[in-house]
Image (tube, rainbow, N blue to C red):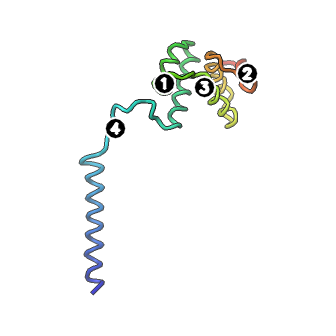
Amino acid sequence: MIRRRLLPALIGLALGLGLGVFIAWYVWPVTYTGAPASVLAPGWKNEAIWMAAQAYAYDGDLEAASGRLAPVFGSVDLGPIVRERAERAIADGFPPIEIARIVRLAAAYGARAPQTDPYLNQAP
């Protein structure tokens, strides 16, 4: 008796699950639009810092770098945030040229540290 009820129940469960996944992924998928950059996950905020440092290394425009980081971090002092990311890059063993770029951006904001200063003299 249990076997007669178990098979239709398992089939119904599989069909319901498959239909639910199909509807959720293809018919009405969730789309996020208009979310502010300040709600980014920490990993993406780090990426924003890296991209701003790369652009600053290319054009040397601190105002543009601030404009790139302001939507992500708001109106806080960006120097300590960028310096902290540089210190983590050093601790994580990133390539010296990458560290130098972010250290230069932090120094442009006036945020320097003894462990980051040697990277200021790295060749671009």
Residue kind at label 3, given as amino acid type: Val
Say which amino acid is labelled 2: Asp
- Tell me the CA gap for discs 2 and 1: 26 Å
Question: Could you say whether the residue bearing mark 2 is in a helix, strand or loop?
Answer: helix
Whichever of labels 1 and 4 marks the residue nearer the N terminus, that label is: 4
| Whether label 2 touches label 1, CB < 8 Å | no
| Separation of marks 1 and 3 at Cα, in angstroms | 14 Å
Q: Could you tell which of marks 4 and 3 lies nearer the N-terminus?
A: 4
Which residue is disc 2 drawn over?
Answer: 117
Residue at 72% across, 23% down: 113
Report crowding for label 3: few under 14, some 14 to 19, many 20 or more residues within 10 A (C-alpha). Answer: many
**Label 4 amino acid?**
Tyr
Across and down, in percent, residue 64 comes to 50, 15
Task: Give the structural element (helix, strand or loop) at label 4.
Answer: loop
Can you tell which quarter of the image residue 10 is in?
Answer: bottom left
**Distance Cα–Cα, label 2 vs label 3:** 14 Å
Say which residue appears at 59% left-offset and 27% top-offset: 81
- Mark 1 lies on residue: 74
Which SS class for mark 1? loop
Q: Within 10 angstroms of label 4, few (less than 14), some, or many (20 or more) residues? A: few
Task: Give residue 82's mark.
Answer: 3
Quick one: label 1 or label 3, which is nearer the N terminus? 1
Q: Quadrant of residue 32?
A: top left
Instruction: Look at the picture and state if 73 lies above or below 23.
Output: above
Give amino acid for label 1.
Gly
Residue 98, how many percent across, how many down? 63, 27
Q: Position of residue 92 (x, y in %)?
A: 67, 37
Task: Give the left or right position of residue 54, taking residue 34 as reference.
Answer: right
Query: Residue tagged by mark 4?
Result: 32
Distance in Å between CA atoms under marks 1 and 4? 21 Å
**SS assignment at label 3:** helix
